[in-house]
């Protein structure tokens, strides 16, 4: 029985170790999918969301390689760029909304969306990429808390 509780403790500790702490004013907006796949965080003006893009796994598998970079660019509709530390990022305008995307080293896709390309959009886009780097520096994986993760905590 103690092994069971140890396993549950480790499962909870792992899932909570990388949950993003959003800037003040952002709240969880539940999406249509009960697993939380379409959950977003919003302050009423700006929105953060994750994308769950399918990726094939093969023997020559590398996250954020040129093939995946092009796949994300095709999906988002604007070019993606690689940082010196191998993050992918891109920004553009889709359907009247400004979009800023960062793909972390595990291939997780995080997006910031806003109707306005203003100082808040600039601040939150910098917050997103710097937070992803900071979590990695601490040995944690940056993730948004979704209802699925809430159930398991």
Image (tube, helix red, strand yellow):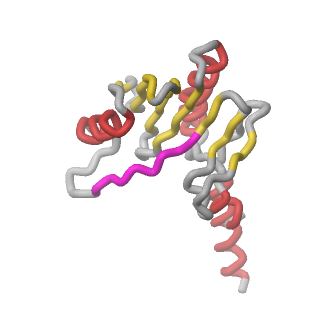
Where is residue 87 shown, x and y percent of the image?
42, 32
- Residue drawn at point x = 34 percent, y = 38 percent: 72
37 to the left or right of 88: right
Q: Which residue extends farthest right?
A: 25
Where is residue 38 shown, x and y percent of the image?
57, 51
Q: Which residue extends farthest bottom?
A: 1
Asked if 12 appears above or below 29 in the picture, the reply is: below
134 to the left or right of 104: right
Asked if 99 appears above or below 28 in the picture, the reply is: above
- Residue drawn at point x = 29 percent, y = 45 percent: 62
Where is residue 90 shown, x and y percent of the image?
41, 26
60 to the left or right of 68: left
- Give the number of marks: 0
Comparing 72 with 5, the one in front is 72
Q: Which residue extends farthest front?
A: 95
- Residue drawn at point x = 35 percent, y = 27 percent: 78
Q: Which residue extends farthest left?
A: 60
Q: Quadrant of residue 128?
A: top right
Comparing 87 with 122, the one in front is 122
Q: Quadrant of residue 10?
A: bottom right
Magenta span dominant secondary structure: loop
22 to the left or right of 65: right
Asked if 148 appears above or below 124 in the picture, the reply is: below
Q: In which quadrant of the rendered image does the C terminus lie?
A: bottom right
Q: In which quadrant of the rendered image does the N terminus lie?
A: bottom right
Residues rendered magenta in the picture? 49-56
Magenta stretch encompasses residue 43 = no
Where is residue 75 shown, x and y percent of the image?
35, 39
- Residue drawn at point x = 21 percent, y = 57 percent: 59
């Amino acid at each position: 029985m103690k092994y069971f509780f140890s396993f549950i403790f480790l499962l909870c500790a792992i899932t909570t170790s990388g949950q993003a702490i959003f800037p003040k004013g952002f709240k969880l907006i539940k999406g249509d999918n009960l697993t939380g796949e379409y959950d977003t965080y919003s302050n009423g003006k700006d929105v953060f969301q994750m994308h769950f893009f399918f990726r094939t796994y093969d023997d020559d598998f590398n996250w954020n390689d040129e093939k995946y970079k092009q796949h994300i660019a095709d999906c988002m509709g604007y070019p993606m760029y690689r940082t010196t530390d191998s993050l992918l990022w891109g920004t553009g305008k889709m359907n009247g909304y400004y979009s800023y995307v960062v793909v972390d080293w595990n291939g997780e896709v995080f997006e910031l969306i806003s109707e306005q390309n203003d100082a808040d959009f600039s601040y939150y886009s910098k917050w997103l990429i710097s937070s992803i780097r900071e979590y990695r520096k601490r040995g944690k994986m940056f993730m948004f808390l979704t209802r699925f993760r809430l159930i398991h905590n």
